[in-house]
């Protein structure tokens, strides 16, 4: 017994050979004709924007470029990968999030680093630590009292 696959069904392309009794000497799928028309319009628009005139030579070169681009695009299109999936894949590839390669920020600066006029000291332990803490508190109170005291009617800046 022989099992037949459905490959033959898909091997037959929807091909337009031309008008009746005047067929073209080449085979082109319907998708290729649609893609070719769109590509020709785009190539012609680009030629006009660049500054080429609408004469026989420039239109002929536009047609040659259109045939080359259409053949390239249609070589990527098949019954397994139709035009809609190719266009969708292209759009998703262009709009996909990318990894940032450039660093954020600028040159390093010390503007955010706090600097103290005194060198940090190791905290004393035991009784000496309690005495030093008491002395620091009393010194702080004396400075606060001086700030509150008015001298000749003018308060010193805090």
Image: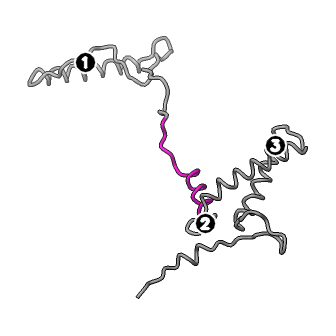
The residues tagged by marks 2 and 3 sit, at their Cα atoms, a distance apart of: 29 Å
Residue segment shown in magenta? 84-101
Please give left or right for residue 153 compared with residue 83 in the image. Answer: left
Earlier in the chain: of badge 2 and badge 3, it is: 3
Crowd tier of the residue under label 1, counting other residues whose Cα lies within 10 Å: few below 14, some 14–19, many 20 or above: few
Residue 10 position by quadrant: bottom right
The verdict on residue 87 being magenta is yes
The residues tagged by marks 2 and 1 sit, at their Cα atoms, a distance apart of: 72 Å
- Using the image, tell me which numbered label, if any, was put on residue 82: 2
Residue 88 position by quadrant: bottom right
Earlier in the chain: of badge 2 and badge 1, it is: 2
Q: Nearer the viewer, residue 1 or 83?
A: 1
Q: Position of residue 100 (x, y in %)?
A: 49, 40
Report the quarter where the N terminus lies: bottom left
Q: Helix, strand, or loop for circle 2? A: loop
Q: Is residue 41 above or below residue 114?
A: below
Kindly identify which residue carries mark 1: 120
Crowd tier of the residue under label 2, counting other residues whose Cα lies within 10 Å: few below 14, some 14–19, many 20 or above: few
Q: Is residue 147 above or below residue 22?
A: above
Q: How is the image coloured?
A: one colour
Report the quarter where the C terminus lies: top left
């Amino acid at each position: 017994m022989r099992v037949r696959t459905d490959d033959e069904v898909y091997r037959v392309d929807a091909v337009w050979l031309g008008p009746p009794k005047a067929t073209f000497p080449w085979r082109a799928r319907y998708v290729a004709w649609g893609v070719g028309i769109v590509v020709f319009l785009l190539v012609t628009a680009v030629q006009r924007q660049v500054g080429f005139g609408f004469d026989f030579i420039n239109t002929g070169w536009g047609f040659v470029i259109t045939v080359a681009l259409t053949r390239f695009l249609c070589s990527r299109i098949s019954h397994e990968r139709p035009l809609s999936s190719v266009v969708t894949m292209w759009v998703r590839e262009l709009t996909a999030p990318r990894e940032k390669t450039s660093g954020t920020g600028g040159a390093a600066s010390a503007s955010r680093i706090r600097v103290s006029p005194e060198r940090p000291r190791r905290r004393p332990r035991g009784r000496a630590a309690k005495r030093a803490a008491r002395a620091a508190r009393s010194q702080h109170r004396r400075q606060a009292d001086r700030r509150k005291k008015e001298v000749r009617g003018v308060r010193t800046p805090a």
